[in-house]
Image (tube, rainbow, N blue to C red):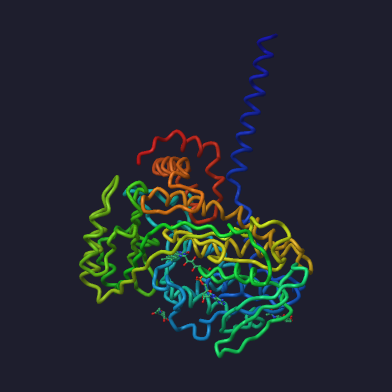
Amino acid sequence: MGNSHSSAYLASTTCALVVSGVVWHKVCTSPPPWIKELDALGQPRKQKLAGAAVVCGGSIAGTVAARVLADHFEHVILVDPELEDIQKAKTRIMQYNAGHVLLKLFTDGARRLWSNFDNELRNAGGRFVCADFQTHYSGVSVPAPYWEYPDGGLPTTLAMRRSSSQKALYQLLMQHPAAANITVWPGTVRGMKISDNKACIESVVVRKLDGAQITVADVGLVIDCTGTTQAGMKWLENAGITLPADLRCSYRPNIRYSTICFSVSPELESKLPIPNSKRNTLAPYLYVEHFEYGLKAAVLLHTDNNTMQLMMSSSEDGNLPRSLSEIIPFLSTIGGHAPVPAWFVETLEMLCECCPEPSFDNIRIPDQSYVKYHSVPAGTLPSNFIAIGDSNLQLNPVHGQGFAKVMLNAITLNTLLHSVSSTLPRDFSIRYFKTNAARTEGMWDGTRMHDYAASTCEPMAGETRDTGRFARWFELKLLSAATKYADVASALWHIRHLVASERVLFAPMVLAKVLWTQSRF
Ligand SMILES: Cc1cc2nc3c(=O)[nH]c(=O)nc-3n(C[C@H](O)[C@H](O)[C@H](O)COP(=O)(O)OP(=O)(O)OC[C@H]3O[C@@H](n4cnc5c(N)ncnc54)[C@H](O)[C@@H]3O)c2cc1C
Ligand SMILES: *[C@@H]1O[C@H](CO)[C@@H](O)[C@H](O)[C@H]1NC(C)=O
Ligand SMILES: *[C@@H]1O[C@H](CO)[C@@H](O)[C@H](O)[C@H]1NC(C)=O
């Protein structure tokens, strides 16, 4: 009797454990909310919201925001001093010569916003390839989950020169039927005026290129898309809003970033000693230095129009190459747990030898910063103020998250706009920032903690280089487990492309493998 009692107890406990294990697994592996919300992206509402939506800044964030807002507002005004001639090289974007990879979330979103996205990007010279960087951490391969996509292969996306992707996206915006209600104003946003009770922005002041100052009245929504300038903070303060002193936090990674662009004819490309399995991918090879050694990285991207771009980063004192003869010597300073493969070195040697005059672009990465609008006390922000893209959060670019982060912001905003019936509620702005912060803060924490490992990094106020030790310990175990276990590699790939939340790492089997695996780094 006692025995059957205890076995019944054991059985029910086991059953409860299994059930909770299954529930735990389900909770962790179900798609994040923003993936479900993709369905509503690009869907116009029936009854448009009143007033003009003013998009301040017309780069990536501005282009995506204008497209989304055209689904919600009667009228969208897009303001940027550099929109007069889209063919002219931008002077205000320092990464204008860098190659940009578009992570899966960006491409997924862009396909909803523009049904002709693939066609237009192909017309602009883009090549769609498997969303795989061939990541090698300290020389060791961290695989992309090809095994999960046996039929069509790994999802596709593309890498392009920034100049090419910027123009192509703007053209998509202007060709879309919604452009009928988008007005482009080449000019600079100077500030805004808020209502007497400080509850909403009433008008926006724009200086056009000819110097004329114009006031846009009857404003429905204002979106700060000014990138690095992060001008929204200044506009709010000048309009009489008191923001917390520590609203913007930043740290200094002290890294340099160089881009070398090769024009590679199809004949030459076919002769490069790149293994066939690595030809139809974003990059044939990406090397990321172990963070305890430094912040060096090197990647060769397949970019648009028969270009290939070699991008490298290092700490300030890292002697990035500035001429052809310095490329291979720089590469030889990269080393870790496995060497850079000989075919990669040979590929670069051939490119250096056979390509006519590649261009060199060497920049200093600015401070990484986060304007924590979500932390201001309720009732402080005007209901109709939003920030998207780098104007809100600017990350270390080596992870290539910029465009996808803009898309994540846009999905969040679109969902929130679909949930309001006529006028924006008083807490609209803070609701956006709080929802958005919950979705993006992991990127800020993850990349920052990683960067703190480097001796040249200057942490943000209140933190030291020791901050995040546990996160770095976990990161090394995670990378190690990803080199061994398919489900861990898959989780990591999906998180990196912003199509899964970090929660997938806490699924029971994934977490167990990560904790169980001894770091090989
Ligand atoms: C070296 C480097 C490499 C990168 N690589 C990648 C990558 O591979 N993949 C990726 O996804 N991301 C990458 N990024 C990040 C990406 O470039 C940024 O996240 C992206 O440019 C942010 O877009 P944005 O529209 O928010 O801001 P920006 O592109 O900085 O644009 C801001 C715009 O605002 C305008 N503006 C400023 N002030 C005003 C004003 N007062 N009124 C009107 N307009 C104004 C400017 O003229 C400009 O057009 C990289 C970044 C760097 C630095
Ligand atoms: C790239 O190629 C496309 C199509 O062939 C062409 O229209 C475009 O102008 C090219 N872009 C550049 C920057 O050369
Ligand atoms: C533009 O706005 C007008 C007036 O609100 C509306 O009737 C029309 O459908 C809009 N056009 C598009 C393409 O959204």
Instruction: Quadrant for residue 504, please give it.
Output: top right
Which quadrant does ligand 3 occupy? bottom right
Residue at 63%, 83% (x, y): give it.
Answer: 183
Q: Is residue 295 in sight in this rendering? A: yes
**Residue at x-position 60% and y-position 69%:** 232
Task: Tell me: residue 321, above or below residue 511.
Answer: below
Depth check: 346 or 299 in front? 299
User: Looking at the image, is 80 positioned above or below residue 350?
Assistant: below
Does 450 appear above or below 91?
above
**Quadrant (top left, top right, bottom left, bottom right) of the N terminus:** top right
Across and down, in percent, residue 236 comes to 65, 69
Is residue 376 left or right of 98 when viewed as pictured? right
Instruction: Decide: is 60 above or below 36.
Output: below
Residue 509 rendering spot, x and y as whole percentages: 52, 37
Residue most toward the top? 1
Quadrant of the rendering where the C terminus is positioned:
top left
| Residue 519: x %, y % from top left | 38, 38
User: Is 250 positioned to the left or the right of 235 in the image?
Assistant: left
| Res. 66 image quadrant | bottom right
Residue 486 visible to an observer of this rendering: no
Name the residue at 50% across, 47% down.
Answer: 491
Residue sitting nearer the eye, 446 or 461: 461
Foreground of the two, 314 or 181: 314
State the image quarter where residue 179 is shown: bottom right
Question: Left of 432 or right of it: where is 254?
Answer: left
Query: Which residue is rendered at x = 25% and y = 68% of the image?
Result: 351
Q: Could you say where residue 452 lies in the image, as x and y percent from the top left?
A: 42, 50
